[in-house]
Image (tube, helix red, strand yellow):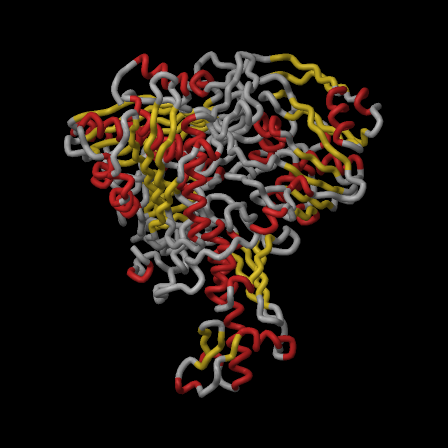
Amino acid sequence: MPKVQVHLWSALRRHTDGKDVVEVEASTTGEMLRALEQAYPGLAAPIEAGVSVAIDGRIYATSLTEPVAPEQEIYLMQRLKGG
Amino acid sequence: MALDEYKPQSGGAELDGERKSFDYVGTRPERPDGLDKVTGRAKFGADAHAPGMLFGAVVRSPHAHARILRIDTSKAEALDGVKAIVTRADFATGLTGEFANVLENVMAGEKALYDGHAVAAVAATSALAARDAVKLIEVEYEVLPHVTDVDAAMAPDAPVINDSYADASVPEGFNANVVRYHESGHGDVEAGFAEADMVFEDTFKTEATHQGYIEPHACLGSLGNDGKGELWCCTQGHWYAQKYCAALLGLETSQLRVTASEIGGGFGGKTTVFIEPVALALSRKANRPVKLVMSRSEVLRATGPTSSASMDIKIGFKTDGTITAAEGTFRLQGGAFPGAPMEFSAMCAFACYDLKNVRQVGYDVVANRPKQAAYRAPGAPMAAFAVESVIDMACNKMGLDPIEVRLKNAARDGSKASYGPRFDQIGMVATLEAAKAHPHYAAPLEPGQGRGVASGFWFNHGGETSVSLALSEDGTAQVSVGTPDIGGSRASMALMAAEVLGIPYENIRVTIADTATLGYNDVSHGSRVTYASGLATIKAARAAVEKLCQRAAAKWGIPEDAVKWENGCAVPSGPNAGDFDPMPLADITATMGQTGGPISGHFEATPEGAGVSFGTHIVDAEVDPETGATKIVRYTVVQDAGKAVHPTYVEGQYQGGAAQGIGWALNEEYIYGEDGRLQNTVFLDYRIPVASDLPMIDAVIVEVPNPGHPFGVRGVGETGIVPPLAAIANAVSNAAGVRLKSLPMSPPKILEALEAGGDA
């Protein structure tokens, strides 16, 4: 399984030993979120509350099946919604 | 940049890169719902009727915060015509998360949490009898201390709304009314401030405002004891209404069929439920349909306004206008429940700019007010007000041009956004350049007038989407979409379908399907409809075209891939495919029953390429120093639409955002008394702008195509409300010669600021 780097928003650092970039093994967004929860149990609650994932600048609001790869820039974001 | 100049870049998986021009998209045909609306034929929420229908009315708390000790319904039950009374006991139990919050908001449990909170409801044979019965229901309250201001609610000794709301994100040491926390950014802001030649820092406040839709909430619910029900309602999302009503009433989702009526405005405020579960609960108890229609007072007291906000902004500049660091703290009050969109305030605040050092913090604060609901780009307008005001203050102090400073710092393709990722192809610079080139920006000002400029950002959204397109034997088409038309989407869908099918716009009818006749659809929110339902319409039409080509190929006896679709006809794909006359769509559909069956196309997906959006506004304001009255004398909106499908509707969205922004900036506010009761519960006292308050609002459409849509479309419904508060505040401050830091900039506040003095 490839390793991907995931950038977190700053408030999540308390759950990741102060790191705002963490590395997990995953090939899809869904696997990535599960791996984050397993590696850092404190992330489970914010992920459950709803997150979006930005991959190379494109924001995936809810997808769990989007492929992720080591060379991509990946950001975890709070779930988007609007009016 | 025009579409024909655009070359697909990375991430441009959806954009139809070969397209050079459009036949239908970009034209301005008549609105398909126009005649119905001007003749009264359109059916809005309150127009629903059913045989044997009862009329509902709601008992609401007169207290901002009170424990409900007893509800005595006996006198009301004895009244002639009363058929059912419901309280919290008539709804589901054991709900968690947002279902529990929505239920608590729909019908109070142990406590009333704000003035206007529903505590019981009645169904009777007439509206008058229902209202009389409401007066006979006796509710005994224990009045509790309350708090309505965001900063007061964060104070250590503030009354606590609910000590179980706060999640694990909140740092230790805060009052339990602080229920969520956000922090994001990058770089080293302290080092950035140390590099600055000048640092500007200030605090800003905005009041809660209502979405101000013309049509109050209205619904008709019918629910039998067998658990099967029907609901007609004005909503931005009938699948959402189905899901939440089913949960709150303990129903199977599919047993409740929900039909969206025509909608008289929503702007985010109709993305949730208020009276719909109540009407269904009354109906289940009475075994008859129940109609519930809110009064304007109920709308203002008990449906979601936007959050109020308190914000601290600090920005460091070099003398040439380069921003070295930016920091913002955003405290948003979202009523008596978690959910104030402080993370969007934080993430949008500095998104217009390419910053090396940026940090943003957000606090979600609860108070004794109605549960906030989304309002166009939730959280972003107030953040833009604070940030863009500080940039204007800096420009004034340093003698720099406000558009040039924004251009110097503007986010561009590939810039690292303040909220993290790198931008794809974006239009921030294009909106600034268009604003700079607009005659408005160079026009002279009269004495007493001031000019303001501000930019704004919104994410936009995709969401679950289903579309079905069916062709008729006469060669016309029906498109079924699941996103209520809140901004002209029926016209946009018809134009996009016409573009693919090659048949006239007038030959396509678009219908908002109910929950029983189409796959799931997310709410009409997040500026998603023209993008997502549009993408789905294009793909459904393309699926139908594929079948049309197959039928032509079969008739000609050539391979399917030897047929292509041009100008509404199947044609051989090249000289080797054979020599056949073009076969029009209507010729194929005329015999479709005998050549393989009905032809239709479907598309179901969650499009994820919405594409972010930027806008820049220019405002001229005139301030009367004797009365503090403000007049907006000129207004120009510049915004990136990606590709404007129906430009008139796009311009309407831009103008609407500016008009609502003028109200938010100058007049609108929730005014609470010492007793925690809302003081201005009708439009006479809650003053939204009317036509005479507004200048002609010039709308400039910039088109930087969105790589995530086949035609390059970006949503346009929300970004237009982001810059106005700031642009107007900058104009008013420059006209008055003093800086206005609190909205609304009502005449008393302007007079107070003039008396206090200072700089703009």
Residue B114 x, y percent position in the rendering: 58, 21
Q: Pick whichever, B427 or B424, lies toward us.
A: B427
Whether B328 is drawn above or below B140: the answer is below
Residue B697 x, y percent position in the rendering: 39, 40
Residue B333 x, y percent position in the rendering: 47, 25
* Side of A19 where B148 appears, left or right: right
State the image quarter where residue B50 is shown: top right
* Side of B679 where B289 appears, left or right: right
The residue that appears at 38% across and 19% down in the rendered structure is B628
Answer yes or no: is residue B5 visible: yes
The residue that appears at 36% across and 49% down in the rendered structure is B701
The residue that appears at 46% across and 79% down in the rendered structure is B571
Residue B134 x, y percent position in the rendering: 73, 23
Q: Which quadrant is home to the C terminus of chain B?
A: top left
Q: Which quadrant is home to the N terminus of chain B?
A: bottom left
- The mark total stands at 0
The residue that appears at 36% across and 25% down in the rendered structure is B311
Whether A65 is drawn above or below B720: the answer is below
State the image quarter where residue B417 is shown: top left
Answer yes or no: is residue A16 visible: no
Q: Pick whichever, B94 or B592, lies toward us.
A: B592
